[in-house]
Image: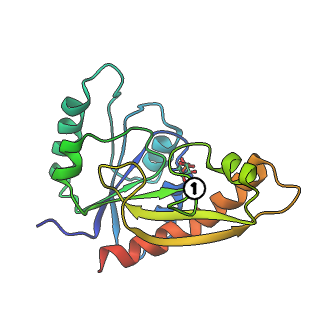
């Protein structure tokens, strides 16, 4: 059984949560930053920090074939925990079974509210007074695994989806490292 404290962070874009996970790492080691987008901005930041990185474009590759390559890479790095951080790709059932109970994700809503995309606009449309973010276990059903931790953000009357997103993102950067630290030692 690989050490759960050996964490791989999977990103597709800017990687601000990845940065927070690296900078606030406590009780875990970021052993790999991996991306399905070779030009993801976050990858360069990780390289500049001297972290191990891996990337391969996922577009044009069959889902499970890609996930097998990714899984082999994670095994090579003796990864025990996978932290999705803006990884814009739905993992195959094969991959999720392979890594069952070892994959976590950050989602910008108070789950079970607003699974999927456009969470900030949806919270505003509903007229929610409180919004936020959740860290959850990844299972086959999208954004439906066990919630490991949440942070609330108050919605202001003048909020737009953009202003709300910024405040929720700041809350994500505090919540995710904290919950990941707890998760790897549970
Ligand atoms: C965040 O809003 C996160 O909640 C969602 O994707 C976004 C990733 O942003 N899963 P970043 O790449 O971490 O900056």
Residue 81 located left or right of residue 39: left
The C terminus, quarter of image: bottom left
Residue 76 located left or right of residue 29: left
Residue 103 visible somewhere in the drawing: yes
- Label 1 near ligand 1 (CB < 8 Å): yes
What residue sits 15% from the left and 43% below the top? 72
Disc tally is 1
What residue sits 31% from the left and 42% below the top? 91
Residue extending farthest top: 60
Label 1 sits on a secondary structure element that is: loop
What residue sits 33% from the left and 28% below the top? 58
What residue sits 21% from the left and 58% below the top? 100
Say above or below: 110 vs 34: below
Residue 43 located left or right of residue 77: right
Q: Position of residue 130 (x, y in %)?
A: 70, 67
Q: Which residue is mark 1?
A: 108
Q: Position of residue 143 (x, y in %)?
A: 43, 53
- Asked whether 159 or 68 is in front, the reply is 159
């Amino acid at each position: 059984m690989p050490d759960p404290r050996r964490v791989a962070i999977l990103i597709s874009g800017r990687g601000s949560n990845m940065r927070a996970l690296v900078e606030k790492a406590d009780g875990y080691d970021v052993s790999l930053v991996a991306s399905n987008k070779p030009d993801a901005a976050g990858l360069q930041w990780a390289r500049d920090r001297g972290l191990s990185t891996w990337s391969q474009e996922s577009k044009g590759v069959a889902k499970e074939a890609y996930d097998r390559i990714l899984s082999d890479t994670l095994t090579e790095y003796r990864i025990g925990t996978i932290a999705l951080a803006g990884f814009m790709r739905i993992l195959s059932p094969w991959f999720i079974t392979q890594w069952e109970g070892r994959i976590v994700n950050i989602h910008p809503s108070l789950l079970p509210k607003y699974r999927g995309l456009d969470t900030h606009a949806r919270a505003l449309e509903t007229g929610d007074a409180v919004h936020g973010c959740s860290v959850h276990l990844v299972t086959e059903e999208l954004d439906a695994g066990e919630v490991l931790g949440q942070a609330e953000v108050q919605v202001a009357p003048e909020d737009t989806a953009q202003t709300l997103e910024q405040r929720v993102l700041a809350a994500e950067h505090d919540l995710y490292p904290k919950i990941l630290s707890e998760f790897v030692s549970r």
